[in-house]
Amino acid sequence: MTFPNAGSQERPVPRLEARGITKGFPGTLANDHVDLVLDPGEIHALLGENGAGKSTLVKIIYGVLKADSGTLLWEGRPVTIASPADARRLGIGMVFQHFSLFESLTAAENIALGLDSAPRPRDLAARIREVSKRYGLDVDPDRHVFSLSVGERQRVEILRCLLQEPKLLIMDEPTSVLTPQEVSRLFETLRQLADEGVTILYISHKLEEIRSLCTQATVLRGGRIVGAVDPRTVSARTLAEMMIGGDLVVPAHEPVESAHAPRLVVRNLSSTSDDPFATELRDVSFEVRAGEILGIAGVAGNGQAELLAALSGESTTAADHVEIEGQAAGHLGPRARRALGLAFVPEERLGRGAVPEMTLAENAILGGAASRGLVRSGVIDGQGARAFADRIIDLFKVATRGHGAEARSLSGGNLQKFIIGREILNKPRLLVAAAPTWGVDAGAAAAIHQALIDLAADGAAVLVVSQDLDELFALCDRIAVMFHGRLSHPQPVGQTSVEQIGLLMGGLFDRSEAGKGDRDVA
Amino acid sequence: MLETVTALLIATIIAATPLLLAATGELVAEKSGVLNLGVEGMMLVGAVSGFIGVQVTGSGTLGIVAAALAGALMALVFAFLTLGLKANQVATGLALTLFGIGLSALMGKDFVGTPHDRLPQLAVPGLSDLPVIGPLLFGHDALVYLALALVAAVHWFLYHTRRGLVLRAVGENHDAAHAIGYPVLRIRLMATLFGGAMSGLGGAYLSLAYTPQWAENMTAGRGWIALALVVFATWKPGRVLVGAWLFGGVTLGQLYGQGLGIPVPSQFMAMLPYLATVLVLVAISRDRVRIRLNAPACIGKTFHPAA
């Protein structure tokens, strides 16, 4: 807890101080008398589960939202921040979680848009080069954003902020899409900024990262501040329990030793596409055995989407490239593959995993009609569907007002629990899940992990495609890496490390596989 | 022969002008993310307002101003519904066209068949008398030159000014533009009004210069062609110019061919310009990189500022 009057002990004037910030939305109080003090040059973590009020607080500081009550003090003076432009004028910069970049514009144009008075294009390019050199943020100002990798895009966002010479830099979940190597590069940049006196407000779910980067942490739960600690002095588990407000049950998974029959076999899968932005799969082969969880790591855009489409049946191939339960299935569509025992949890929950405008009961029918007999001679069994939805909600502890709630009204974590629950209750012999806990808070993530582990323990084969290495290492028996459409040889988790997988994700492919390891990260 | 070619080229420029005006305006609106399918309706109201303006005041300039204002007013109705009340843009645009057809017919009831003088052709002493080049380049009325100047101005605005950059950014990703702090709705309102004014001018060209009279539904689908031209041009002003001339040329070519007595049904010849448009659209849509670079990603999407 921070008290406004505790400043008597010779601390510098805080860069930003929030006093009693309160903000309500219909039905919830997103921020309830939140106090926050940010000192110059500190890297301050803001922690909390989804819906704890972190985003709301940050949006109020950045002028996107207006607080119902409470005051903000900037370097000791009360200020009103009515718009992001006001925030920028004070010296507040923000790097958004979902990048706020314009894909069809160049990096330089994107940066110009973030500046309130843009210099002439030539001067701007020179300044971009200067700042990017100073902080080791390589960006070519003339390239179009859509052609940049995720890491490069983030550098554009950071550069956009740095060119305004901010005194407070807000970063919302900046590392969720980076390789471990990119993360350490980012941290070097942030530490350099902090040394120069910039305050950094760092929002993240990743507790280990916070422990290694941040010097102060404020924990929010249900819109209120529930604690302030120095994260270097406490364990990640303690931080997690502060966030949840209870004990964290970490799922444990015993790796399977015995090699059971393969449930999914992929052989020499290649794809060609007339879409210049798609990655072509190149000779991908692997198998997933019964009782096993196989993880596929990799930075997004390296062919995971294409592989997942080829597995779900959304794109088809010659029959023998994909084998499900011993049957050639490459030519089959999604329904035929589901009939063979495949369940699929796509990365996009709304739109692919569930129909946003439909109720949970209706969504339950869409996923479970065939295997549960919810449709008889073309007529929907409404009662059965509602009962099925209720069972999912009950078993997987989905927080919702009931089976009549629209899918889009659920938070990301709860909807994901519902979708995974629906797929699991269909008793699949093979489950393919993409980014199952992306953007999901710790409690829900643990529940989802547990469900996947239980499913594998019951003898199903599970394939998890994810960018989150912590997740893969916690769940999987073996891990492979996708890079530029190719898949590395899967390695048992015990025989590999985060660093090694990180190198593979960065493209050190053939070389590290061959046991060398030239430093040649692209 | 040379005279025929010259005459055809001049006629092409004239036939292209209403398309050029309307398409350039629509391009700006679409670049900001607003898909206004009411171009046909706005052109009609512009055409009748321009005609009435000239009849009442006797001044061609005031007629042109009246047409632009009337087009902008129609666009304001569209903007109020789609930007203010968040109505669906496609449905509202279609309704605007139908509304415009009816409104223009009502306004022009007493003016049907009244002829008046064509807009005066500007003559540059000396230059206009040159053979071929004279009539081709220096013998048009003010709206033809205005249309060309506006295409150049729009290109310069979109790609060489900060406001143009902001407008493109709003059309590309309105959430991001909002997050950085740009007034998405205000920018879209301005772009929509500009589009309406340009459509009004395009309509006025028809009723003041192309066929200087008012007839119901006299745009005859040109608003729809203008909409197609924007896509055809992959949202680039320079290519709108090429497309408008091409379309004007094909239209006249088929008229000329009919005049020569080529034994093809005239209905088929009349289809040609539209068929050509469809074919070129298909060809262009295959180039995904170009579409990705130039098509505004948020086109037609309603902007709800995040809570």
Image (tube, coloured by chain):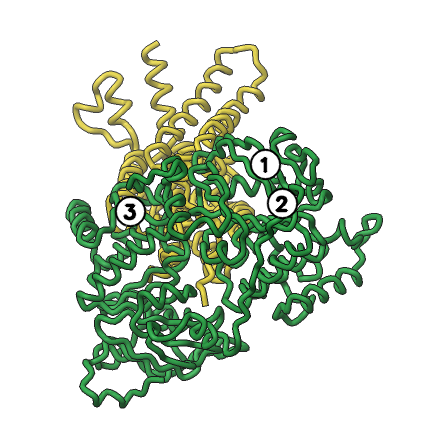
* Circle 1 residue: A266
Q: Give me the C-alpha separation between circle 2 and circle 3.
A: 50 Å
In the foreground, A457 or A351: A457
**Where does the C terminus of chain A fall, quadrant-wise?**
top left
In the structure shown, which secondary structural element does the residue marked by tag 2 occupy? loop
Q: Say what secondary structure mark 1 lies in.
A: strand
| Same-chain status of marks 1 and 3 | yes
Residue A357 or residue B261, whichever sits in front:
A357
* Residue matched to label 2: A259
Q: Residue at the location (37% across, 34% down)?
A: B240
Q: Residue at x 27, y 38 (%)?
A: B152
Q: Amino acid at mark 1?
A: Val
Give the residue at the far right of this rendering.
Answer: A377
- The residue identified by callout 3 is A107
| Number of numbered markers | 3
Q: Quick one: label 2 or label 3, which is nearer the N terminus?
A: 3
- What tint does the image give chain B? yellow
Residue A160 location, x and y as percent?
26, 55
Q: Residue at x 28, y 43 (%)?
A: B159
Within-10-Å neighbours for mark 3: few <14, some 14–19, many 20+:
many
Chain bearing tag 2 is: A
Q: Nearer the viewer, residue A287 or A464?
A: A287
Given this view, does label 1 or label 3 mark the residue nearer the observer?
A: 1
Tell which circle, 1 or 3, labels the residue nearer the N-terminal end.
3
Chain A's colour is: green
Residue B85, given in percent of the width and then of the height, sits at 50, 62
The amino acid pointed to by label 3 is Ala
